[in-house]
């Protein structure tokens, strides 16, 4: 406890001292206090850890973070605090490094997961620093985790047609067409209502991450299949996509994922997932020359780097471009 008191005093004086002066201050305090016993009072610090986490989450909510993201932030930060068993003002860089190392070893987590945790902790401690709750973020010296840039799979034209030809329900065909032609997120699709669809302009407004609105567009084939699906329904549910059986509830993300996965197994197509349609559209758009800024707006990405991760140019076209411009 005595050493903790000395460390707290030295940390508080760091902005006003150079390294030599800080070391000298520590020596003086150790000499002055060596014959004294120091104990901690039960009053605690004025800002408890839970209060600081709550304040941080409130700040992120004002910035426009979704509730899903806020829950992930809270669980990530709380897991770190529980594991370290320290107050936020006592956590140092070595504590964070050790936590990330142990987490990766225990959970067998990927480097992408570890970097996501690092990024959230960095955001939390940087906020504490900006708000003057701590002097310096302990994550500042922990750099971005290098991750492998794997080329993620997309659907070929043949695979898309195979799925379309083998849909046993017009609803499933409409879902596949809407995902493939708009590139919308499955979470955005399940929120759509019938009245949201503008068939004349072949467009609709979706609510993306952070409740941000954007316009997406669909092709003529999607329009025909959507109209046929809606004409076949006898229920009064305003949702665009509902379950096949009564009481015809709005479809959930899990329900759509399960339906597509079962279709993939039946057709022998591996890894059929809604997000793969989004990646396919991005790759196809870049492949056909769509400006990356327009694709960024279409997909609803805040940062263009995210769009570039989705858009994988086909290697065959790279070869043709090389022959055209270089060879």
Image: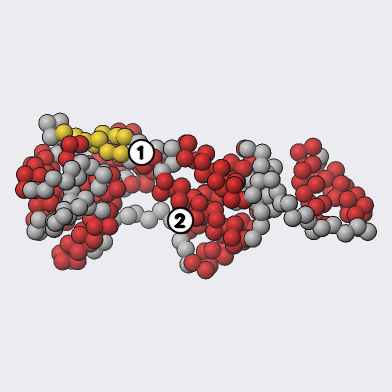
Q: Position of residue 56 (x, y in %)?
A: 55, 43
Q: Which mark is residue 28?
A: none
Q: Is residue 64 left or right of residue 135?
A: left
Q: Residue at x 45, y 56 (%)?
A: 112
Name the image quarter holding the C terminus.
top left
Q: Quadrant of residue 292?
A: top left
Is residue 177 or residue 87 the one in the foreground? 87
Q: Position of residue 123 (x, y in %)?
A: 55, 45
Q: Quadrant of residue 130?
A: top right
Q: Which mark is residue 211?
A: 1
Q: Residue at x 13, y 34 (%)?
A: 199
Q: Is residue 137 left or right of residue 189?
A: right
Determine contact: label 2, label 1, CB under 8 Å: no
Q: Is residue 291 above or below residue 55?
A: above
Q: Residue furthest top?
A: 201
Circle 2 packing at 10 Å, graded few (<14), some (14-19), many (20+), is some
Mark 2 or 1, nearer chain start: 2
Q: Residue at x 67, y 44 (%)?
A: 134
Q: Position of residue 270 (x, y in %)?
A: 24, 63
Circle 1 packing at 10 Å, graded few (<14), some (14-19), many (20+), is few
Q: Which mark is residue 112?
A: 2
Which callout, 2 or 1, points to the residue nearer the camera? 1
Query: Dot 1 lies on which element?
Result: helix
């Amino acid at each position: 406890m005595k050493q903790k008191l000395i460390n707290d005093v030295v940390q508080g004086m760091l902005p006003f001292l150079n390294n030599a002066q800080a070391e000298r201050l520590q020596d003086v305090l150790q000499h002055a206090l060596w014959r004294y016993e120091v104990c901690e009072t039960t009053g605690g610090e004025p800002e408890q850890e839970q209060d600081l986490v709550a304040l941080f989450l409130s700040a992120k909510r004002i910035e426009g973070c979704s509730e899903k993201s806020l829950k992930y932030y809270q669980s990530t930060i709380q897991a770190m605090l529980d594991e370290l068993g320290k107050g936020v003002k006592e956590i140092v860089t070595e504590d964070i490094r050790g936590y990330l190392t142990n987490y990766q070893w225990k959970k067998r987590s990927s480097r992408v997961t570890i970097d996501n945790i690092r990024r959230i902790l960095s955001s939390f401690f940087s906020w504490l620093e900006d708000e003057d709750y701590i002097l310096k973020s302990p994550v500042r010296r922990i750099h971005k985790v290098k991750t492998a840039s794997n080329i993620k799979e997309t659907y070929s034209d043949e695979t898309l047609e195979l799925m379309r030809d083998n849909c046993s329900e017009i609803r499933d065909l409409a879902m596949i067409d809407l995902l493939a032609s708009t590139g919308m997120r499955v979470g955005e699709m399940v929120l759509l209502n019938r009245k949201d669809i503008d068939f004349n302009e072949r467009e609709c407004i979706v609510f993306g991450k952070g409740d941000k609105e954007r316009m997406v567009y669909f092709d003529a084939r999607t329009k025909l299949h959507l109209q046929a699906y809606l004409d076949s329904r006898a229920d009064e549910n305003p949702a665009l996509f509902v379950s096949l059986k009564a009481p015809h509830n709005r479809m959930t993300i899990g329900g759509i994922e399960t339906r597509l996965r079962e279709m993939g197994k039946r057709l022998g197509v591996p890894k059929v997932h809604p997000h793969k349609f989004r990646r396919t559209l991005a790759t196809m758009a870049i492949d056909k020359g769509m400006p990356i800024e327009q694709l960024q707006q279409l997909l609803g990405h805040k940062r263009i780097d995210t769009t570039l991760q989705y858009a994988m140019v086909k290697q065959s076209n790279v070869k043709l471009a090389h022959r055209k411009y270089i060879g």
